[in-house]
Amino acid sequence: MIEYRELSENEICTELFANFIRRQQVTRCWRKEKGTWVIKDAPFVDDWGQEEYKVLVSCLKNTVNTGGFVCGVFADGVLKGFASVESELFGENSRYLDLTSIHVSADMRGKGLGTGLFTRACRWARLHGAKKLYISAHSAVETQAFYRAMGCTEAQEYCKKHSEAEPFDCQLERLL
């Protein structure tokens, strides 16, 4: 049974992620060169250890405590995906809310869980005054294919905080 639900601060702990598999084998990534997007070979494995999960838990708790949205998707009671949206509008004319995370466990990718999380994040952002959802997204070809399928395009307005912190990320937006 698949269940989506908003998470409370008390639920968010490292144990929640005990059966979550972050691992992503990346072979090709999008890179912007001289103003044009190109696909480059860039093989690496993206994975999280205990320290990354501790940071994640802290960030997600902060999102909830500052009025943001954290949604989990569970398969038979086990967390298999999550998404978070911050509560503070930003950008010119305060049009954006920030999708700070969306991840599906490796064993459940390709089953529609990411689409369900993204749809819920968009709905929450729209209900909280955003005209657009902002995404600083991993540049892996597969990740970008997901966001394109969700209707995302290159951000018209780059968030400096994100583009400086993650220079290889693709800065995207989704009209709500």
Image (cartoon, rainbow, N blue to C red):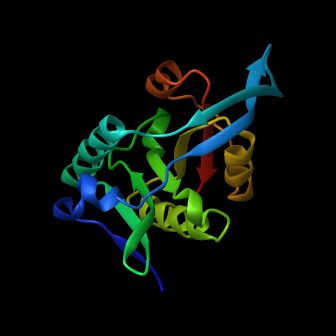
Give the residue displayed 37% in from the left and 78% down from the top: 77
72 displayed left or right of 31: left
Residue 161 vs 132, above or below: the answer is above
In percent of width and height, residue 95 lies at 48, 45
Check the image and name the residue furthest to the bottom.
1
Report the number of numbered marks.
0
- Residue 107's image quarter? bottom right
Residue 93 vs 169, above or below: the answer is below
Quadrant for the C terminus in the image: bottom right
Give the residue displayed 53% in from the left and 58% down from the top: 104
In percent of width and height, residue 124 lies at 42, 64
Give the residue displayed 62% in from the left and 53% down from the top: 175
Residue 158 vs 47, above or below: the answer is above
Decide which of 135, 96 is in the foreground and name it: 135
Give the residue displayed 52% in from the left and 25% down from the top: 166
Decide which of 174, 164 is in the foreground and name it: 164
Decide which of 49, 37 is in the foreground and name it: 49
- Residue 109's image quarter? bottom right
168 displayed left or right of 97: right
55 displayed left or right of 137: left
In percent of width and height, residue 44 lies at 65, 30
Decide which of 48, 82 is in the foreground and name it: 48
